[in-house]
Image (cartoon, helix red, strand yellow):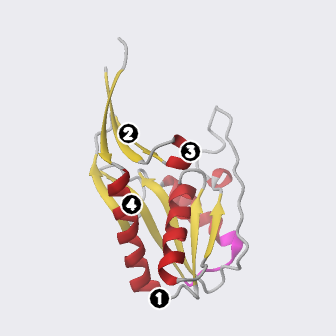
């Protein structure tokens, strides 16, 4: 039997912009001027969100803040078991993370495996004072690890037959979050 996909836009461009603005205001409430804080986006899909947050925070604070990109491919617990080619992405952490307040950023929290890998990878770049997690979408009912984001754009209840795809203007030509339902 063929698989039939149904999709529904659950977040459009204006809602994403409002969400990012709200997340930035929450970050400013906690981190102030970001003098001891750094944003770290997880490659590949967390980078677009990190760049948006960086841009908005820099505008709101009228100053550049620290941000970096982190590839966690080699830290994944399924790295050696994966039969397909694993694409590597650049890591560009130019700041010593010792005693920094790190905000780890990804687009979707699903099982927590990518975030766990990110926490392992961070330790190669120093010992942060704290690590917080920011996600645009938290998929409920699917965590494999006890990981809870500090900042959440939107919570979505999903079934195992569903997936979430975040599309960004820079990569996909449109800003939107899609819920995809696969039916047999």
Number of callouts: 4
**Looking at the image, is 43 positioned above or below residue 103?**
above
Real-space Cα separation, disc 2 to disc 3, in angstroms? 19 Å
User: On the image, numbered disc 2 is attached to which residue?
Assistant: 163
Tell me if residue 127 is in the magenta stretch.
yes
* Residue range of the region highlighted in magenta in the rendering: 123-129
- In the image, taking residue 40 as reference, residue 24 lies left or right, namely left
Q: Which residue is drawn at 52% across and 41% down?
A: 172
In which quadrant is the C terminus drawn?
top left
Q: Which residue is drawn at 29% across and 44% down?
A: 158
Which one is in front in this view, the residue at disc 1 or the one at disc 3? 3
Look at the numbered discs 2 and 4 and tell me whether their residues touch, using CB distance below 8 Å.
Answer: no
| Badge 4 density bin: few <14, some 14–19, many ≥20, Cα 10 Å | some
In the figure, residue 95 lies in which quadrant? Answer: bottom right
**Looking at the image, is 21 positioned above or below residue 46?**
below
Look at the numbered discs 2 and 3 and tell me whether their residues touch, using CB distance below 8 Å.
Answer: no
User: On the image, numbered disc 3 is attached to which residue?
Assistant: 171
Measuring from the top left, give residue 88's x and y in whole percent: 70, 47
User: On the image, numbered disc 4 is attached to which residue?
Assistant: 17
Q: Residue at x 58, y 82 (%)?
A: 63
Q: Which residue is drawn at 62% across and 37% down?
A: 82
For marks 1 and 4, the one nearer the N-term is: 4
User: On the image, numbered disc 1 is attached to which residue?
Assistant: 32
């Amino acid at each position: 039997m063929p698989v039939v996909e149904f999709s529904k836009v659950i977040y459009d461009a204006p809602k994403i912009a409002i969400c990012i603005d709200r997340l930035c205001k929450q970050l400013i409430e906690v981190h102030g001027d970001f003098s001891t804080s750094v944003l770290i986006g997880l490659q590949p899909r967390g980078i677009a969100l990190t760049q948006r947050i960086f841009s908005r925070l820099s505008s709101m604070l009228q100053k550049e803040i620290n941000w970096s990109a982190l590839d966690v491919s080699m830290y994944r617990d399924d790295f050696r078991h994966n039969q397909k080619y694993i694409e590597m992405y650049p890591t560009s952490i130019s700041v010593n993370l010792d005693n920094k307040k790190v905000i780890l950023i990804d687009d979707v929290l699903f099982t927590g495996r990518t975030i766990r890998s990110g926490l392992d990878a961070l330790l190669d770049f120093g010992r942060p004072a704290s690590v917080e997690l920011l996600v645009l979408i938290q998929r409920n009912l699917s965590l494999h690890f006890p990981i809870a984001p500090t900042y959440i754009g939107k919570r979505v209840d999903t079934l195992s037959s569903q997936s979430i795809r975040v599309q960004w203007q820079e990569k996909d030509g449109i800003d939107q979050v899609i819920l995809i339902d696969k039916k047999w």
